[in-house]
Image (tube, helix red, strand yellow):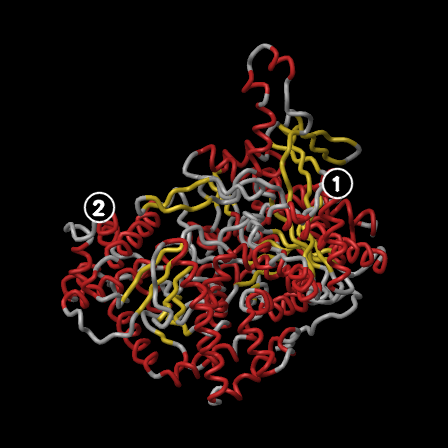
Amino acid sequence: MLEDAGDFKQKFRERFISIYGKDYTQGSPKQQFFALADLVRGEISRIMYEQGQRQGRSREKKMYYFSIEFLPGRFLMTNLHYLGIKETVERGLAELGLSLEEIKDQEQDPGLGNGGLGRLASAFLDSLASLGLPGYGCGIRYRFGLFEQRVVNREQVELPDNWLQDGCPWEYRRPEEAETVKFGGRVSIQFNNGRLFFIHENYESVRAVPYDIPIVGYQNKAVNVLRLWSAEPEHTGFEFHTFSRGEYARAFADKISAESISQVLYPDDSTFEGRKLRLKQSYFFVSAGLQSIVRQYKREQGRMRNFHERVAVHINDTHPAVAVAELMRILLDEEGMEWDEAWRITNRTISFTNHTLLPEALEKWPVDLFRELLPRIYMIVEEINNRLCREVSGRAMDSHEILKDVAVIWDGCIKMANLAVVGSHSVNGVARLHTQILKNRVMNSFNGLYPGRFNNKTNGITHRRWLLVANPLLSDFLMETIGPGWLSDPNEMEKLAAFIDDPAAQEGIERVKLRNKERLAGFIREKYGIAIDPHSIFDIHIKRIHMYKRQLLNAFHILDLYNRLRENPDLDIVPRTFIFGGKAAPAYFMAKRVVRLINTMADLINHDKRIKEKIKVVFLENYNVSLAELAFPAADVSEQISTASREASGTGNMKFMMTGAVTIGTMDGANIEIMERVGPDNFIAFGLTAEEVLNYYAFGGYSAWEIYYEDARVKKICDQLVNGFLPGGFQAIFDYLFQHNDEFFVLKDFASYVDAQNRIMERFRDKRNWSRMRLQNIAHAGFFSSDRTVSEYSREIWKIKPVAAEKTLLLSKN
């Protein structure tokens, strides 16, 4: 470990010379970053080696977390803090005439995820390592990530997210541990010595090469691994003789076909080839991951009959649900087990988190596509379905109706959520309300079929990252006010509640918030040329652009406020800055219209001198973790306004809360639990309840046109979409609202939302009370640490325990 600044300086100089063959003073900031990252990686490598020597062939149970997304953000600052060397490195760099602040900005955000699903997965890996728990990630090493978002002429434009252009300094390529994944071909059946053998022939073979990224625990000498699989051709992927004949594209066909699997996160699935590629991706990393796990288990443990006692496999949403059938394939075809024994092991090994209530997000695959691409896996899925149907038919009088809900294969489609539920011993929702809706409505038949299988694990966030790394000013404030105990036990943040009426604490938290707002304002001025007032209310809405998340409702309120200011520029309001960020899926037309609407409004409002700069609108393009680390600490108001019953949990709401923002939100997902913790006086609630929304969906009774004619404000805004008031026009949004009868109740909740926004303005005028609200939110945010969530998973689902380390954090029992 680095001993002091002098030791660091010597090692940094030597490392720079060894990499670049010149002195660090002659290098660019990017080269200085790579040299620093390589030095830090060396420290991590030493810990990994010592950990391996210490644990040997540990017989502790291990958990493997399968997710199509991981969104870790930059690693440098987290690793420095978690290794306990941040101050040493910063001081050493300063003595060398270098700035850690400048160097850290050279790191690229890994393009491995999009939104909450990927960020949650990364938070769990952070907490697993920090709690000393043997938990490992398994995903895909996307070459280009999702996409880099740019706004051109107010429209979202997608560019390649070339995050690997200069390489990733943290990863270890492990070609010696590559696995083979098979697609297509045919399966023949042979009968020999009383057993059936399934022979897979004429398949496309893809080589899966693992890249390991170390996940460092917080100052506890523990390092876990995120294993990402890269798709390569089984052989060279280059046909020399074909190339020599001048058929250049054909010569590389195998290489292109294989490598396409790990090129891009979420390829456009509006075409057949896009859907096929998505299914390939899901099977690719699941098959490679499970083969690797089994290989390691057999090397260390031996008997596969005890596999579930030493291995837990967790499916994060439905993308990896094919793991149920793939593990069965390995146990049946490669280990020679009988069906019942293989099923018992599979079921006890796998657990599943459901993340959505939207029917279109519960993955389904056409039988023909699935059978053609994964012939042996299809045979296993079909057998799982047949056995399930026999079980249901033998147990229920109204079996046909139940089968419509629970069958894995139905109406020509394979339902991946159903496969995950059937094949898992535990199924959890991610907020109390979400789990209730799963059990009582969406998966009620399953809940009756498998009593006790469903449970709740409310999401959490890695509090050390969002405070220690992303918000050092608030971190220092907490250290001074309540001490450092919250770093290892987030429940200690509750000590801050004793200071909510302390004038010194109130002044302190406002100083922190203002400086963070000034930092974001400076970024916006430099990048977009928009001057915003740090003393205005920073109302921030950053998340994936989707109609159920209702950025449209926020936009309508801004238009209403703008209309009022145009009528009366002297209207007495607190100045407001509305900040948006998020990506719309390339094929999601309506979401992209909303992005255009927000940017059109921004151009119109920000240049209107009549309203005296009382409101400003900013869209932060290319939203990612690094941008989130800038935005969350600056927020006064957290927008959590999804249609009630549609948002499973949310984690942005927790990050905002933890950094001192006040939530305006529907009674949806984890918003309910946040309000219970902080109290209704410190949460601005509005809108329909989940029960009211679900009843409208089930029984009707709502008319968007009635709202249009009854509320003059709604009529004016909707008319402005199409009457030329907004440049370019938004007929598509108008038609969407009324042809689909406002399916996410934007118009229905509009009046309630405007009232709630007015309450925010009045509360903000009372500076002392607003400071109390900030402090109250921070004080009760510890419950929403991912340490608590992971502790619950570990005790109740995975059954894993901490392994020996220098120090492990507390496993919360709350």
Q: Which residue is mark 1?
A: 177
- Secondary element at image label 2: loop
Image quarter of the C terminus? bottom right
Q: Residues within 10 Å of mark 2 (few under 14, many from 20)?
A: few
Q: Amino acid at mark 1?
A: Glu
Q: Nearer the viewer, residue 127 or 107?
A: 107
Residue 328 seen in the current view: no
The location of residue 203, given as percent across then percent down, is 63, 27
Q: Nearer the viewer, residue 597 or 666?
A: 597
Residue 542, by quadrant, is bottom left
Give the label on residue 728, or none.
Answer: 2
Residue 153, by quadrant, is top left
- Secondary element at image label 1: helix
User: Could you tell me which residue is drawn at 45 percent across and 78 percent down?
Assistant: 510
> As displayed, is residue 457 above or below residue 730?
below
The location of residue 55, given as percent across then percent down, is 83, 59
The location of residue 727, given as percent across then percent down, is 21, 48
User: Could you tell me which residue is drawn at 60 percent across and 14 percent down?
Assistant: 242
> As displayed, is residue 470 above or below residue 18?
below
Judge left or right: residue 806 versus residue 465.
Answer: right
Mark 2 or mark 1: whose residue is earlier in sequence = 1
Q: Nearer the viewer, residue 101 or 115?
A: 101
Q: Amino acid at mark 2?
A: Gly
Image quarter of the N terminus? bottom right
